Image (cartoon, rainbow, N blue to C red):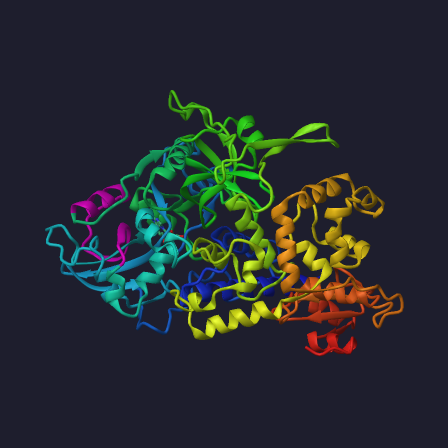
Amino acid sequence: MKKDLISKKYQEKIKSFSYFNKRYYNDNVSEITDSEYDNLKKTILDLEKKYSFLNSKDSPAKIVGYKPSKNFKKASHRVPMLSLANAFSESDLLNFEKKILNFLSHNLDSDIYYSAEPKIDGISASLLYKDGKLTQGLSRGDGKEGEDITTNLSTIKDIPKFIQSKDFPKEIDIRGEVFIKNSDFNNLKEKFANPRNAASGSLRQKNPLDTKKIPLKFIAYTFGFEKGLKINNQFDYLKKLSEWGFKTNPLNKLITGIKNLLKNYDEVEKNRANLDFDIDGIVYKINDFALQKRLGYVGNAPRWAIAHKFSSDKAISKILDIDIQIGRTGALTPVAKIKPINIGGVLVSNATLHNEDEINRKDIRIGDTVTIERAGDVIPHILSVDVKKRLKNIPKFIFPNKCPSCGSKTIKEFNSITKKKDAVRRCSSEGYFCEKISIEKLKHFVSKDAFNIDGFGKKIVENFWSLGLIKYPQDIFRLDYKKIEKLEGWGNLSVKNLKYSIDDKKKISFERFIFSLGIRHIGLENAKLLSKYFGSFSKFKNLSKNKKYAELLNVDGIGETQVNSLKTFFSNKMNIGVLNELEKILIISNAAIEKKDGLLKNKTFLVTGKLNGISRAEVKSLIEENSGTTVSTVSKKLNFLIVGDKPTKRKVENANELEIKIIDQNQFLKMLNKTS
Ligand code: IVH
């Protein structure tokens, strides 16, 4: 890579890093997970290591946190609050010890003692005591200056306000972590993404009375400035802290040898789900203060300590229960309810078990200790079961042979292509007999690519269903608005808006209509094929009478699976009833006859960002109806980039570079002689 390209990449990373720091430290918002943050930090540090010309004042090597927020008065730390380097593997630890021994010119086989302290994932704070009295409490801020949050910190019960012990230093900054217990977080789940955000948010409330309402805890582990401390090692310091009335971590240990550090790490990691607080690793500190002093600091982290982080995409926890979810097509999906565990900054409490076969293959049972993986945006899943940890007499999990929602038989279909039974078990009911299936069908009916009813989300479907306001799709168009207006959270205006959105969607294209019915195996593409084939709704509905299913096999793209599914759909009376009712309410336009010489002939389009009042699927069909083509990437082949709200920056930049015409929604509609 060329020097200027490397610089550019580096500056971009620094910019994001500063941005996320500002959001986190000033606005209390984590826009990325901890592991994403750690990765970003690592990329920057790696780049700096590789290319010595890279150097920024905002580098993670130079800054600890972010400038304190303006909401609170600032105050300097008498001794800076630093951060820790991270270790992820055995070799990182061996390296850490080797460097220390080299620095101290010790023999490579000398025994070094470490204080191994579980790293609580909370917010660090520094408490200044003068003559045994708590006089000031600061947040970390940027490490040099913190926010004066004395009053808020004073509301925490674990923080002693007066200490009378004779050996308590005349002056000392006691440092530690403010956090919230997982069990207390349960009540705050709605408001915050994870316990750390909850602690940070509560601690920085403008009104200390708001802080007091939240059960914050404090664990002490180090000190900053001191005058009169008569202790010479970390482990004795921790003991003293508890004598003085501070809480310390009961899992702190004094350990020598990397092997033993690793053993302790494994044990703690296995036990993590049983702790009532979040930890994201273990901090190792050289026990002897004299050695700590000799070792000193590199950059903004001590040479004498390191944080051994837990894997950012795996964790061990326990299965509390197995829930069976029912999808729109009747598929029964088992979901493991697990003891909540933080994986890479996200509190995970559900893991998919995929299907019955997967449960049998891995012999997963309720009560099992399991390793869960959460990688990228993939739904967390179970990697393995620790059978040794299984208690005696725990029965095998029996997959229900009756639908948990409607009691119908559950079946595994025979797949004529693979000549095997499906892995998925389904509820055998049809139409709108099964409650759970019906709810899912309604969610699909109002969804973006179907009726796209603004403001009619999944929660509303569930809510209206439970109130008996909707059961079948047609009920959506005959809502009792008077009743809704009286519901909590609804008012005159919101009801008016809802009515407007629903009425607005009474006119619908034929292909979208077919798609919205949620017939198994009939997705957007197949709905399009069927709409072209039948041309109109009445011909489609006629299928139930003329039963010309076999002819459908002539449609390129439609196969036996789809035909069988249509047969099942049309043989159900409830479905026919729904079609009849919808026909009375809706205006279903006939399939557009494709114009070969349409207005957009030989033109290619790509949409980025959110459009207003028109979905991407609709734009796509408008383009195709008018002989245009849609493409999926910005390249020289692209003629028009349609840009909506919050577009992908890259796409816009690339389009600019390639001098591709960038247009908005209105300009696009104008090309079709339409206005929005
Ligand atoms: S010692 C120079 N000990 O980890 C030493 N920190 O990245 C600095 N933390 O800001 C801190 N448990 O928020 C230390 N037992 C422990 C800790 C701990 C959690 C946090 C703390 C600090 C961060 C370091």
Using the rendered image of the protein, determine whether residue 46 is visible from the camera's viewpoint: no
Using the rendered image of the protein, determine whether residue 416 is visible from the camera's viewpoint: yes
Asked if residue 560 is positioned above or below residue 227 in the image, the reply reads above
Question: Residue drawn 35% across and 62% down?
Answer: 201
Q: Nearer the viewer, residue 257 or 344?
A: 344
617 sits left or right of 120 in the view: right
182 sits left or right of 343 in the view: left
The answer to if 277 sits in the magenta stretch is no
Q: On the image, which quarter does residue 317 sit in?
A: top left
Magenta part of the protein: which range?
A: 214-243
Asked if residue 668 is positioned above or below residue 591 in the image, the reply reads below
Q: Nearer the viewer, residue 320 or 97?
A: 320
The location of residue 202, given as percent across then percent down, is 32, 61
Q: Residue furthest right?
A: 597
The location of residue 280, given as percent across then percent down, is 41, 46
The location of residue 409, given as percent across then percent down, is 55, 32
